[in-house]
Image: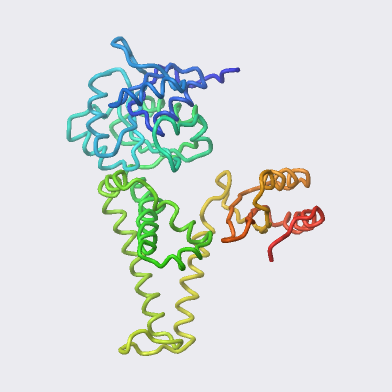
Amino acid sequence: MNVVESRLTGPVRVVGVGLLGTSIALGLRARGVDVILSDASPTNVSIAVDYGAGRGATDGDEPQLVVVCVPPDVTASVIVRELSAYPRAVVTDVASVKKPILDAVIAAGGDVTRYVGSHPLAGREKGGPMSGRADLFLGRPWVVAGHAGISYQTAAAVDDLILDLGATLVEMTAEEHDSSVALVSHAPQVISTLMARRLAGAPDAAVNLAGQGLRDVTRIAASDPALWVQILGANATPTAEVLRGVRDDLDEVIQALDASSFGSTSPSAEALPSSTWRRTMVEMLAGGNTGVARIPGKHGQDRRYASIVVMVDDTPGELARLLTEMGEIGVNLEDLRLEHSPGAQIGLAEIAVLPEAVERLTAALADRGWRIAG
């Protein structure tokens, strides 16, 4: 196997070999970088070593860069420890909050001339070293939260790390980062969780009707509660600000629904004219359309795709055949979602493609015997 040249000279010390730490280590090893692994759990280190993610620490190690990949509540203390233990190394971390950690490092007397926080916006639904992947960061945004205490030249090692792992470098202040992730990650986690809580006591008959929409909304509600308590606690103020805005919108929707002319749920509510309550709902729903259109698509493009839904028999090889035939037709798959029909041996494959390819793909698949829903 040919080893791609690395920008980093190494060694790189990775502290915490869970999903992110192991993935970073695997990505660097693929480029021939000497990676030193450290974790509070010797078992995690052994697993990561067996996976080829690096080697155990030795007394003579002199890392070029230290990457701290531990839970947010201990990140600052580990950063300070690593800065002291390796006075020639640049130190970064991958925690999902930045300003509280920077403030804590400064308060503890850490040498911030060699520390800059960073955050890769990548992950998987599974954790631990066995879930690590060398390609986890390819094409994903990775924020560097620069500050006045570190020079661009010193922080260049962190930039090299990001580029070596195939991520897209994004520069922000710590404050900008925390307010941004509150909007795109932390508040959505809370909203998904609260919606999923509605299912806990729901009748089986209702839950069995669940389709892809509910699965999309609640997918991240399966995340680790212990980790998210730490994340939300560290980024409480920006997250609460986003949730207040959502609460205001919810109050307006609830008021319109309660007072609609289609049936008031409250004896004290005065029914609104049809045009008034409809206008409120249309404005809210259209606002959602506008917002979702701004979410970057594949390769970070702000581009909307069209979709077709193909009925796929729930038998081995059928989905692979569909994708193969799409390639033969010459249409590129932009995104794919699968949904199973309750009680039927059939699946629905929602295929996203460029709008100009829809008519040609639909006709070609139909000619090959595929059933197109709708």
Depicted 95 relative to depicted 203: above or below: above
Residue extending farthest left: 108
Q: Which quadrant holds residue 122?
A: top left
Residue 357, given in percent of the width and then of the height, sits at: 73, 54
Where, quadrant-wise, is the N terminus in this rendering?
top right
Q: Nearer the viewer, residue 117 or 212?
A: 212
Q: Which quadrant holds residue 21?
A: top left
Residue 202, given in percent of the width and then of the height, sits at: 39, 66
Instruction: Report the coloring of the rendering.
Output: rainbow
Residue extending farthest top: 60
- On screen, residue 352 versus residue 23, left or right, reads right
Q: How many marks?
A: 0
- On screen, residue 306 versus residue 159, left or right, reads right
Where, quadrant-wise, is the C terminus in this rendering?
bottom right
Q: Nearer the viewer, residue 146 or 248?
A: 248
Q: Name which residue lies at 45% across and 31% down.
A: 132
Q: Nearer the viewer, residue 226 or 35?
A: 226
Q: Name which residue lies at 75% across and 57% down.
A: 362
- On screen, residue 309 versus residue 225, left or right, reads right
Residue 261, given in percent of the width and then of the height, sits at: 44, 88
Depicted 255 relative to depicted 355: above or below: below
Residue 181, given in percent of the width and then of the height, sits at: 38, 49
Residue extending farthest right: 367
Q: Name which residue lies at 55% across and 46% down.
A: 300
